[in-house]
Image (tube, rainbow, N blue to C red):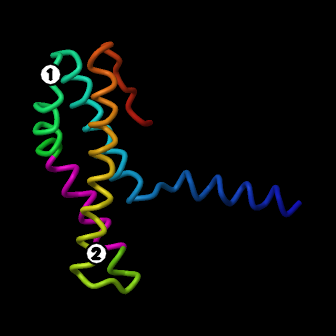
């Protein structure tokens, strides 16, 4: 019985939506679209690195803002929260760049998150 209740509560919580996850998905999906366009255009890896570093400024800023706000709520300093946010954002960018380097040769594209 407890398992059923816990499952129901977790299901309701996930339906509510998490602002941080929504911002992360928006940023990630924007980078995925950037990746897919660059794969179609057969961009060079070095060009894609430049493109990905500047891509999705609105989504990047929104995700950074929510990450910083979250870290500050746990007591982090502004500088530490911004450093954490920059690292989290860079991990997503690095992941897309790494995937691009693998996919550009065979034309494989990524599927956006739902």
Residue 65 in the figure: left or right of residue 23? left
Assess disc 1: are there few (<14), some (14-19) or many (≥20) residues with their C-alpha within 10 Å of its C-alpha. some
Residue 66 in the figure: left or right of residue 34? right
Residue 81 image label: 2
Q: Quadrant of residue 80?
A: bottom left
Depth check, front residue: 34 or 44 = 44
Earlier in the chain: of badge 1 and badge 2, it is 1
The N terminus - image quarter: bottom right
Task: Examine the residues drawn in magenta and state their main secondary structure.
Answer: helix
Q: Which residue is mark 1?
A: 43
Any magenta on residue 110? Answer: no
Residue drawn at x 21%, y 15% is: 40
Could you give the CA–CA distance between mark 1 and mark 2, rounded to whole angstroms?
34 Å
Depth check, front residue: 50 or 75 = 50
**Residue 67 picture location, percent across and down:** 32, 66
Depth check, front residue: 50 or 11 = 50
**Residue 87 picture location, percent across and down:** 29, 61
Does 53 appear above or below 41?
below
Range of residues picked out in magenta? 57-70
């Amino acid at each position: 019985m407890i398992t059923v209740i816990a499952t129901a509560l977790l299901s309701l919580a996930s339906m509510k939506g998490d602002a941080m996850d929504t911002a992360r998905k928006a940023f990630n999906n924007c980078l995925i679209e950037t990746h897919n366009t660059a794969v179609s255009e057969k961009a060079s890896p070095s060009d894609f690195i430049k493109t990905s570093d500047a891509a999705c400024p609105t989504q990047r800023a929104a995700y950074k803002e929510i990450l910083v706000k979250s870290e500050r709520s746990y007591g982090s300093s502004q500088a530490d929260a911004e450093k954490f946010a920059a690292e989290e954002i860079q991990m997503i960018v690095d992941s897309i760049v790494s995937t691009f380097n693998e996919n550009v040769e065979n034309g494989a594209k990524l599927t956006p998150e739902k």
